[in-house]
Image (cartoon, rainbow, N blue to C red):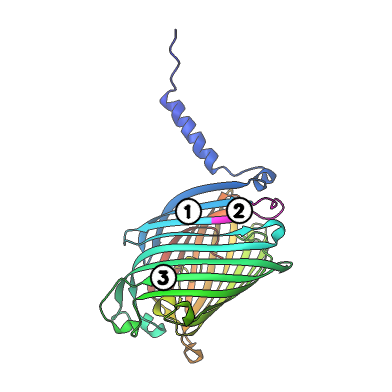
Amino acid sequence: MLAAAQPTDSVRQAGTWQKVKNYFKLDADTAAHNKKRFSISFLGGPSYASDSKLGLGLAGVAQYRLNGCDTIQPSNASVTAEVTTAGFWKLGIDGTTFFPANRMRLNYELEVLYAPRDFWGIGYENGNYDEDKVKLHEHDYKIKGELLFRLANNIYVGPMLQWNYANSGIVESTPLFEGQDHVIRNYGLGLTLLYDSRDLITNAYRGVYLYLNQVFRPKFLWNRYAFSTTDFRACYYHTAWKGAVVAGEARALFNFGNPSWAMMSLLGDSRSMRGYYRGRYRDKHMVTTQIELRQYIYRRFGAVIWGGAGSVFHDSGSFRHWLPNYGLGLRWEFRRRINIRLDYGFGRSGQSGFIFNVNEAF
């Protein structure tokens, strides 16, 4: 009896390469793609930021549909994991679940991180002064959920729950904390009003997004630091010419009452004021704005440029300092209308950061 022929190394390599190609291949049949009940994909890449240094990130994207949701856009979830040379690590998941006939939607967010980072204190002036900063070994946990009910076409309203935990990781006394606790727990209840006419929430080509959220953290909910937060966002998306989308965002975040150092408005993250050291500028209130040009280039590749500005302040009298922000990035269409983004943002005083993430910044 003849022995079965064994595959050669070249055949194995060809088979492996074909599997890789199939994994990254876009679904050519859009109708078939839209009917899929569940799909998930992962991709890794480098990251760099001035607060976390060089790192490696893993981005995962999932699309899924509940029964009866074949005619609306798919629900989505994004998973991010990151570890860096500075000892920083983060695990997060966020997404939106759409219910049949768009009658309801559930927004959710979970984030756990450890961040060895500098702390300049509270206020714009402290953020500009480099001599007295201290090193935190901060643990942050966050859980947030919103259940929104449709009132009319594109208009939703519903309750929101949020829990936050922060531990500075230091025990020595420093005036930068202004006598506040180093371990913070906050429980919040809120209400969200939303208008959303975007054609696709993860990568909009056209539409308007208006978000107004009011959260209360009273003392009877076991909050040592009682305060309320008003969060307003406005985004506009417009197809300017073939392959080009102009996107603009304005955001205002106001804290009223007695927020702790950990729950103040922090300027700079992967979505807004990209490139700034997160938390260097922190205060009760924050206003940011940005405009971005997204241009398709070739096959699955695109590029973006953006410019914007932001400010943190304690009251109306201190609302006088604006920080510039600008940058550029590359886009690669990992899955149909799901982009992997590589952004490099610049700010004042040489601050900059490289961001690896999934989906557009806003």
Q: Residue at x 25, y 78 (%)?
A: 172
Image quarter of the C terminus: bottom right
Q: Residue 319, how many percent across, how many down? A: 49, 87
Residue 337: which numbered mark, if any? 2
Q: For marks 3 and 1, give the one nearer the viewer.
A: 3
Q: Amino acid at mark 3?
A: Tyr
The number of numbered badges drawn on the structure is: 3
User: Neighbour class for label 1 at 10 Å: few (<14), some, many (≥20)?
Assistant: many
For mark 1, give the secondary structure. strand
Q: Earlier in the sequence, mark 1 or mark 2?
A: 1
Circle 3 sits in a helix, a strand or a loop, which is it? strand
> Can residue 128 be seen in the rendering of this structure?
no
> Distance from label 1 to label 2 (Cα)?
15 Å
- The image shows residue 43 at horizontal and vertical percentages of 47, 49
C-alpha span from label 3 to label 2:
34 Å
Label disc, if present, on residue 165 of the rendered structure: 3
Q: What residue is disc 1 on?
A: 59
Foreground mark, 1 or 2, reads 1
Give the CA separation, mark 3 to mark 1: 24 Å
> Which residue lies most toward the top here?
1
Q: Which residues are magenta?
A: 66-77
Residue 110: image location, x then y, percent: 48, 62
Amino acid type assigned to the residue bearing label 2 in the image: Arg
**In the orientation shown, which residue stands out farthest toward the front?**
220
Q: Residue at x 67, y 50 (%)?
A: 67
Q: Residue at x 69, y 45 (%)?
A: 31
